[in-house]
Image: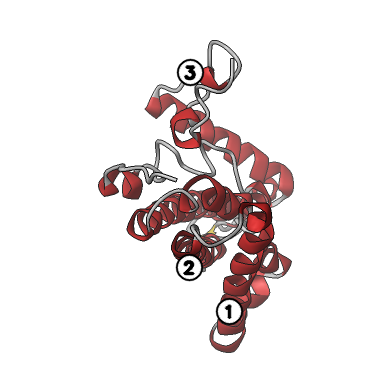
Amino acid sequence: MAENKTPLVKELTKGILKENPTLVMLLGMCPTLAVTTQAMNGIGMGLVTTFVLLGSNIVISALRKVIPDKVRIPAFIVIIASFVTLIGFLLEGFVPSLYDSLGIYLTLITVNCIIFGRAEMFASKNGIVASACDAIGMGLGFTMALFLMGSIREIIGSGKWMGLEIPVLSNNPMLLFIMPAGGFFTLGMIIAAVNKLTNKKPPQELGCSGCPHAESCGKAGDCQ
């Protein structure tokens, strides 16, 4: 399969805003809503996911020509799970507080649709350097989205930020923002702001021709 010759700078920057995995593609919603009650948790989950995404993208890209097509999905899962296990051991040993905060959502990174989606759509079709750039860009975009959500929810819902009390807000926190409903509300407002900044509009027609990711998927000409 021929490799895409997309400029590396584009791969590094696309995930930050234009193709942000959380705010544009709406992937990884479970950890996004669950762990962002604090800004620090958002950073932690984002960096852990970036580590797994980078490692799995590099390995999958390196092995893409030797992994049989019929078993590529199980192979991807094994590779991703190996990196999740590794980062789990490291966090438990060196950052136990973050390990406890992430809880079950750390293990669920194995089936995170952001990581699996990049493995299927990009790493399995491109070289190692491009795949690494794609992973870093998507990881940074995911981390920034979680940090932003966590900051807003922590400041308004707890009257604190990164553990520091904020005058006035600390005495009158809106507890709704650290509850599930507050997570959905915060995410919706951020997505609306991002759509306004990028001038994103709904597709005028269904199918691959109306999909903003048709080019990277490689099936734009197969659907009508």
Q: How is the image coloured?
A: secondary structure
**Proximity of marks 2 and 1: CB atoms separated by less than 8 Å:** yes
Residue 201, numbered circle: 3
Instruction: Provide residue 187's location: percent of width, then percent of height.
Output: 59, 40
Q: Quadrant of the C terminus?
A: top right
Place residue 14 in its image quadrant.
Answer: top left
Residue beneath disc 2: 55
Tell me if 169 is positioned left or right of 111 in this view.
Answer: left
- Residue type beneath disc 1: Leu
Residue 129, numbered circle: none
- Neighbourhood count class around disc 1 (C-alpha, 10 Å): few under 14, some 14–19, many 20 upward: few
> Which tag, 2 or 1, sits closer to the chain's start?
2
- Residue type beneath disc 2: Gly
Determine the residue positioned at 48% across, 31% down.
Answer: 213
- Label 2: state its secondary structure: helix
Instruction: Provide residue 165's location: percent of width, then percent of height.
Output: 50, 64
Q: Is residue 184 above or below residue 168?
A: above
> Which tag, 3 or 2, sits closer to the chain's start?
2
**Mark 3 → mark 1, Cα distance in angstroms:** 41 Å
Place residue 94 in its image quadrant.
Answer: bottom right
Q: Is residue 193 above or below residue 29?
A: above
Front residue of this view, candidates 60 and 37? 60
Instruction: Provide residue 105's location: percent of width, then percent of height.
Output: 69, 63
Determine the residue positioned at 30% across, 43% down.
Answer: 5
Front residue of this view, candidates 214 and 188? 214
- Label 3: state its secondary structure: loop
Residue beneath disc 1: 86
